[in-house]
Structures are given as C-alpha cells and as structure tokens.
Amino acid sequence: MCADSLDRTLLAVMARDREGALSRVPLLGRRGHLPVDERRAALARDAGAEAVPHEAAGAIDAEEVAAWIAAHYPAAEYPAAVLGSPHGAAVHLAAAIGAAWLPTAFRVTLTWPGGDAGDWPAAMEWGSRLAARIVARNPGITVRQVHDPLRRGPVCAATVSLHLRWRHLPGAYRDLLRDRIAFGGAALLLRDLRTWPVVTRSPRFGFQLGSPAGGWSAHDYTTENPALCALLDDLGTRHWPPPSPASAPRYAETAGEPAFGVDLAKFAAEIGLPVHRALYTTPAVLSASVADLYRRWLRAGGAGDRCVIESGRLLDPWQALAGGVVPYWSESAAHRDVESAEWWLAGSESFDAVTVLPDAPGHAGDPGATLAHWRSLTSFGRCRGALDRQVAGRYPALPVAAGHATRVLAEAGGEPGTPPTMTMLRAVRGLRRSGSASGMMVS
C-alpha cells in the first residue's frame, strides 16, 4: 500500500498509528533546501527507493493485503463496518459509530527505470506489463493505472501508480463481517461515482491520464493548458503527446469496482447483515453531510460549536471526537474544493471558531487555492480562527506529515461534551437528511 496514498493515511488514522505512517513526511514534502533541478532528481531517487521493485509485481497478493488491513482492527467485536471509496468524512463517520473502515481498493507504486514524467504512453506500456503479472496472480481484482504529474510531480518520472480494486469481498473482509460485527450491526458502502476518460487495454486493466481528485478536468491534461506546460517545465520535460482518442468515460479510480457492491450485498444477505449505501458524484456533498450530522449530534451533548476544515491527508477523527469539533474534509487544496468548504460555511450557522488545515499540494500555481483563500475560511467563526503556522510556512510546495493534524486539532478543540451514542441508523438518517437534496443517494 503506497505510503503517500490517501487510503493508507485513512487506515493509519483509524488505527492511531502516530509513530508510523502518520509521522512520515511525504515524498513531495522533502528536500526543500535543494535547488529545483537537484531536488527533482533527488525526489525521483527517493521514490524509486521506496516503491515496490517492478520485478516483484507478480508477488503482490491482494488477499494478504486485505488480511493486513483487517488486522488493523483487533477488537473482538465492532458495531458496524464502513466500506468504500477513500474519503476523509468516511473515517469520521466510522469513528463516531465505532466502526471498522475498510477500503475497497488500494494503491501500489512500482519502480519505472528510465521513466519520463511527460511520456505517458511509455508509462502506460510499462504499467500494462506490470498489471498483467499482478492480475495473473490475483483473479479477484482489476488494475487502474493513474499517471498524474499534477499530483505526483517528479515522482511519476521514476514510478508508476496502480490502483488494485477488489471485484469481490476478500476473505479477510468476509471473516470480519461474519464473525466480528455485533448482533444488530450493519454495514455501510460509500461509493464515489465520478467518471474520467479511461483507455481500456484489457478487461482487467485501464489507464487514466490525470484524476478527478486533483482539481483539473480531463481537458486540462493537454498542452493547450498553459498551467500544464508550466508544470512540465518544472519537471524538466516537454514531452506530452495528446491524450488518446480511445479514452471513454468510465468510473474513476476513486470509485472502486461496481461488482464489489453486488458481492457485498449477496454475502450480507447470506449472513443476515443489513447493508446501507451512500452514492455521490461530488465528494463535497459527503463532507457537508457528515459535518452537518456531526454538528447535530455533538450539540445534543453540549459541544459542536467549533469547526475544523481538514484537507487531503491532514485529518484525525479521534482527536476531533475528543475535542467535540465538527469536521469538514476537503479532498484537496484545489480552489474548487476550498470554495465548496466556503459555501458550506456560508450556509451554516456560525461557529465560535474555524480552524483550517490546508494539505499542501506539492506545487505552486493552478489549480491550488492561495493561502489567503484558506485563511479567509477562518473569518466565518465568531472569534478569530487559526491557520497553523508550520503548515502555512510550507504551503503550497512542501506538505507536512499527516500526524501534524493531531496537534492542531488538540489546540482547536473545546469541551467534548457527552453526545448520545451514534448508531448506524442515526448516521444513515442524517446522511439522507443532509445529502439527498444535494444529489447523494442514501439507501
């Protein structure tokens, strides 16, 4: 599981791994003291050193990865399970319920000797060969490659990024749902339904140029976009062929496999486990719905007057609960995501204070929001809010370790109060109440 991936961070925060994955500075946050050309080369070397060697692609075992994920939840019993697309609000929801959070896909980064960040056709050919070896070993998965210099910078010149997506419930997930969900418990599947142009090279391998999670549209990944040309210059390349005309809209890498939900429903019916679903096409809708749910819930216990706007990997659901803080998670530092948070704050009753945690994108310029835009969110509080100085000092080029969010949230919290127990039924009703009018389907 790629150490810099969102799903790895979400798993780490749920397991409270503050001395491991959460203390790790991401690749794009390192080597800031070096000149541009030297830093680019150093980051590419670091990425290659941390990636899975391409020679080992055929040894990747998705069932063993699922068992490792399930092992992050050692309790004998859980009241529920939350499964699905990587989303910060999903782990806040799981923490409130006391549920296990289980991703339906995971990202693997493998070495790409002699790679070029701008030569995406070569990246696709290399990824296709590695994917063939992976799916030969793992009949229950598909592979989606994402080549995105916007989000990965110089790292994508030395490695390829593959998302392994389960088509069926892996054995370890079946065991957890059958043996360790309490009587009367339930499961919730959260699924991101955004689409993106995909080159389908085989029934079980597809290639994406860019991602909806980065802030650009698919049309921005052409040399007609001046921001892409500037980015390629920063990466030391001018090579960028036009996107493939064979690309057709498919569910993006964040969606997981549709067949997973079908298999989950079938298995749950066999063991008598109720399954709810929440389907969304805009991550901000789920973020707002969970934040609204939290506020009503915390207010019932005498808290909920403070808010934190988290982003990317900078979140901590357990510290938010400990401080009685309402969490709103922004997918990225893209202007559109910060604007969504701004609209939510504008339409909500004022908080006493609003703290913001911008996860630096690792580059300057379009489509990232400015630090001033982030700081403006704090003005929605009755009292002056806060933007952490360390985060601000490294924004936008140098992201910090994910565990930094714990300290910031500890300072932002107030009296936690004693809210009533959050049940799955209460959560589903709350999501339906807030999200249905904004296009989220909850069942």
Image (cartoon, rainbow, N blue to C red):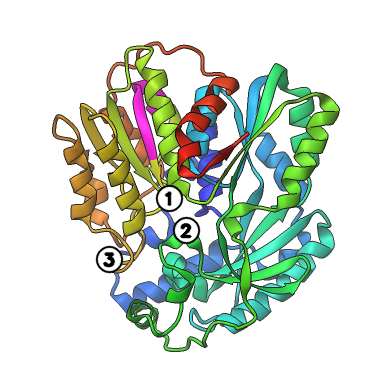
Q: Which residue corresponds to the image point at 72% horizontal and 26% vertical from the top-left?
A: 274
Q: Where is residue 44? Give x, y as percent.
A: 47, 72
Q: Where is residue 24? Give x, y as percent.
A: 44, 48
Q: Where is residue 121? Give x, y as percent.
A: 60, 83
Query: Which of pointers 1 and 3 lies earlier in the amino acid sequence?
Result: 3
Q: Are marks 2 and 1 in contact (CB under 8 Å)?
A: yes
Using the image as rendered, state which of residue 8 and residue 231 is in the foreground: 231
Using the image as rendered, state which of residue 347 and residue 42 is in the foreground: 347
Label 2 belongs to which residue?
213
Crowding near the residue tagged with mark 2, few <14, some 14–19, many ≥20 C-alpha atoms within 10 Å: some
Q: Which residue corresponds to the image point at 81% horizontal and 57% vertical from the top-left?
A: 138
| Image side of residue 420 versus residue 304, left or right | right
Which marked residue is nearer to the observer: mark 2 or mark 3? 2
Tell me how far mark 2 sits from mark 3, CA to CA.
28 Å
Tell me how far mark 2 sits from mark 1, CA to CA.
7 Å
Q: Quadrant of residue 124?
A: bottom right
Label 1 belongs to which residue?
331
Query: Which of pointers 2 and 1 lies earlier in the amino acid sequence?
Result: 2
Is residue 112 highlighted in magenta? no
Tell me how far mark 1 sits from mark 3, CA to CA.
28 Å
| Image side of residue 265 versus residue 10, left or right | right
| SS class, disc 3 | loop
Question: Split into 4 quadrants, where in the image is the C terminus?
Answer: top right
**Which span of residues is magenta-colored?**
319-328
Q: Which residue corresponds to the image point at 26% horizontal and 56% vertical from the top-left?
A: 394
Q: Amino acid at mark 2?
A: Ala
Compared with 261, 421 (above or below) is above
Crowding near the residue tagged with mark 1, few <14, some 14–19, many ≥20 C-alpha atoms within 10 Å: many
Label 3 belongs to which residue?
33
